[in-house]
């Protein structure tokens, strides 16, 4: 595949274009501080997107992960407060990830064991997770989050004045994204499990015939997305310093859009972590730079919708032309 | 890929319809027994009849897209955008207190035509993206849905368009005899879709293409043309739902009815539509709509929260899908 027809290249070009345009129109916004803020805004989206990437590579789709993240986040926060365990961030992450894994296994059961279509299953579990939280766990906003989460949001990797005079701060929460990327990259590119996930997305039939444990691999994928989503939920609540059970749900299509913009295909077997991060960056930058560029924020949806059509349309069109030529 | 709900013979399809009818009757009986003084009343029937047509028409559109093996995630975007265009025609040409003169009726007809035409154009955009360019339906309609919503926001700057002539309220709030107009609108569109699917060549080809696109192509069916027409029809149905919605709300806005998207998918699948294409009947969608409406009205009367409703809907979907899958698998020789 030539460099030009790759999604990563296209997305990078648009990304650089947007940043350059913003820098020309509004030079005062082109600072280290702005980029640090963008990074902070994209954190939760990034962690969620990494999980979605794994599902797309395996040939499935998950729209329940936002409800799952809200479930794990809200349940964990409430439990920590109820049990008085408010000073351990490790506990928050472990518990949210565990809840995420358990809920992910519910998806796994329907997808892997019952072999139902993933989109419909996860639409169903989206409603179930959300309905369960709001009916049985609560609907009230927890604005006094556990102290560990508050401290976590205050802790910075670095802060200070950058060389260009702007004030910047890099929250420690970035480490969570870095860890998620590192672990996922290791699984995808360095383990047999990763090869299995790619193979599954390429063709379930072929994967079965060469002896890949399809059911186990699918369970892993949905459990892993669950774990990442739970962790993303905790990061979200920490940074916002409020645990709101209504948060996050509604983001699912944006996250999927980011992953798809980054080159992952719904048909499975294709997708890279670099592309996914670029896709997330693009969406975050667009949301930010439209305002700087003086374009009313009302245009946001139009621009992102257009980019999805462009990002999926170009490769589809090229593939079709190649097919005709052959 | 393995098959989902509804894939099977006509006998299985009929069995699913009978099961659905039983579910609808059971819910109806249960709610009537639990709250006879509230549920089993003319007032409740009337209020239910005003509530379901909006999402029922959207569910018909969703089912149609699923018959071809696709999906239409842009139905809400289309409904709101076309509704807003109709609203602009109305507010520009007929002021609120314009009465019910012939000229006002003409403006309303014009607004309806504008909205349905806008729906058709939106549908054509989907169809071209899917059939001509080759984008997978989920992504194409996800992208266009965002664009339609975005255009609606840009036109209205995010505000609601209000101030329709009184006569327009008839569409969402009026009666034909004892029957609420929205139900009449829904019955009309359901009948049209049933006719198209079971009595026309186009309908037959939709089923053939949904069952096996490759075989359909070798049988000389122009798949791209069928797909394009299907999505145009989806757009028109979505626009019709948008008209009912805006008449009932007496305003048009870019973000009305967003929860209907999940609901429309849920109803289509619950109604026995196979998301991989080829199977699905209007009757199934109607029964699924009635079941959910009985359930949600009953829940309101039992004072159970709206969120529990969502939980039960999700469980119902998973249960129905899971059960039919297990049943299919038990049948020896049918599957691997």
Image (cartoon, rainbow, N blue to C red):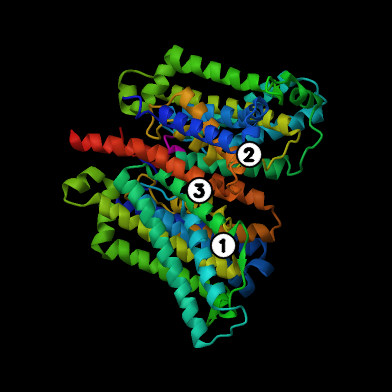
Mark 2–mark 3 distance (CA, rounded to whole Å): 21 Å
Mark 1 crowdedness (10 Å alpha carbons): few <14, some 14-19, many ≥20 = some
The chain holding disc 2 is: A
User: Percent position (x, y) of residue A265?
Assistant: 40, 33
- Range of residues picked out in magenta: A113-118
Asked whether the residues under marks 2 and 3 belong to the same chain, the reply is yes
Q: Which residue is mark 2?
A: A248
Residue A33 is covered by the magenta coloring = no
Q: Secondary structure at mark 1?
A: helix
User: What mark, if any, has residue A302 been given in the picture?
Assistant: 3
Give the mark toward the camera: 2 or 1: 2
* Helix, strand or loop at mark 2: loop
Q: Which residue is mark 1?
A: B28
Q: CA distance from mark 2 to mark 1?
A: 35 Å
Where is residue B196 drawn, in percent x and y?
A: 31, 64
Number of numbered discs visible in the structure rendering: 3
Q: Is residue B229 above or below residue A90?
A: below
Q: Is residue B14 visible?
A: no
**Residue found 44% across the figure and 18% down from its top:** A194
Circles 2 and 1, Cβ within 8 Å, touching? The answer is no
Say left or right for B79 vs A152: left
**Mark 3 neighbour class, 10 Å CA radius: few under 14, some 14 to 19, many 20 or more:** many
The N terminus of chain A appears in which quarter of the rendering?
top left
Is the residue at mark 2 from the same chain as the one at mark 1?
A: no
User: Which disc number belongs to residue B2?
Assistant: none
Q: Is residue B240 left or right of residue A325?
A: right
């Amino acid at each position: 595949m030539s460099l030009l027809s790759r999604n990563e290249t296209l997305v990078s070009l648009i990304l650089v274009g947007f940043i350059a345009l913003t820098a020309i129109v509004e030079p005062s916004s082109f600072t280290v501080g702005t980029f640090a803020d963008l990074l902070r805004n994209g954190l939760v989206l990034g962690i969620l997107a990494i999980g979605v990437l794994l599902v797309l590579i395996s040939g499935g789709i998950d729209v329940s992960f936002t409800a799952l993240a809200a479930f794990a986040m809200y349940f964990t926060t409430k439990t920590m407060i109820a049990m008085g365990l408010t000073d351990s961030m490790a506990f928050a992450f472990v518990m949210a990830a565990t809840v995420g894994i358990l809920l992910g296994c519910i998806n796994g059961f329907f997808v892997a064991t019952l072999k139902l279509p993933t989109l419909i299953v996860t639409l169903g579990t989206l409603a179930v997770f959300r309905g369960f939280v709001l009916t049985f766990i609560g609907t009230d906003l927890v604005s006094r989050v556990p102290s560990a989460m508050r401290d976590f949001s205050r802790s910075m990797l670095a802060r200070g004045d950058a060389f260009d005079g702007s004030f910047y701060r890099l929250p420690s929460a970035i480490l969570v994204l870095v860890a998620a990327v590192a672990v996922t990259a290791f699984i995808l590119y360095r383990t047999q499990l990763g090869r299995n996930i790619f193979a599954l997305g390429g063709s379930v039939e072929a994967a079965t015939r060469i002896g890949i444990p399809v059911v186990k691999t699918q369970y892993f994928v949905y459990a892993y997305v669950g774990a990442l989503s739970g962790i993303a939920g905790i990061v979200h609540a920490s940074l916002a310093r409020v645990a709101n059970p209504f948060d996050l749900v509604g983001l699912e299509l944006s996250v999927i859009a980011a992953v798809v913009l980054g080159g992952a295909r719904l048909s499975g077997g294709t997708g890279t972590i670099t592309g996914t991060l670029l896709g997330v960056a693009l969406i975050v930058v667009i949301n930010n730079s439209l305002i700087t560029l003086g374009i009313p924020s009302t245009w946001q949806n139009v621009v992102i919708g257009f980019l999805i059509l462009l990002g999926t349309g170009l490769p589809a069109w090229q593939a079709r032309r190649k097919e005709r030529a052959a | 890929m393995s098959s989902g709900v509804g894939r099977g013979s006509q006998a299985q399809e009929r069995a699913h319809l009978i099961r659905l009818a039983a579910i609808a009757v059971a819910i109806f009986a249960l709610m009537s027994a639990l709250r006879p003084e509230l549920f089993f009343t003319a007032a409740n029937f009337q209020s239910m009849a005003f509530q379901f047509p909006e999402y029922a028409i959207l569910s018909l559109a969703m089912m149609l897209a699923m018959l071809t093996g696709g999906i239409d995630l842009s139905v809400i975007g289309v409904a709101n955008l076309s509704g807003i265009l109709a609203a602009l025609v109305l507010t520009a040409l007929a002021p609120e207190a314009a009465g019910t003169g012939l000229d006002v009726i003409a403006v309303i007809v014009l607004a309806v035509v504008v909205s349905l035409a806008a729906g058709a154009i939106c549908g054509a955009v989907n169809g071209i993206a899917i059939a001509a360019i080759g984008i997978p339906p989920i992504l194409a309609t996800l992208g266009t849905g965002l664009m339609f919503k975005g255009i609606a926001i840009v036109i209205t700057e995010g505000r609601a368009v209000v101030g329709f002539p009184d006569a327009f309220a008839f569409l969402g709030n009026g009666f034909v005899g004892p029957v609420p107009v929205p139900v009449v609108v829904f019955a009309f569109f359901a009948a049209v879709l049933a006719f198209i699917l079971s009595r026309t060549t186009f309908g037959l080809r939709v089923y053939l293409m949904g069952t096996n696109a490759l075989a359909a192509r070798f049988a000389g069916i122009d798949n791209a043309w069928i797909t394009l027409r299907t999505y145009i029809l989806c757009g028109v149905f979505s626009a019709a739902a948008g008209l009912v919605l805006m008449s009932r709300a007496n305003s048009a806005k870019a973000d009305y009815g967003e929860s209907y998207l999940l609901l429309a998918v849920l109803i289509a699948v619950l109604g026995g539509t196979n998301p991989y294409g080829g199977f699905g009947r209007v009757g199934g969608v109607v029964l699924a709509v009635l079941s959910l409406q009985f359930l949600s009205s009953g829940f309101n009367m039992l004072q159970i929260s709206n969120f529990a409703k969502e939980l039960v809907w999700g469980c119902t979907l998973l249960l129905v899908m899971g059960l039919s899958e297990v049943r299919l698998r038990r049948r020896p020789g049918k599957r691997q």
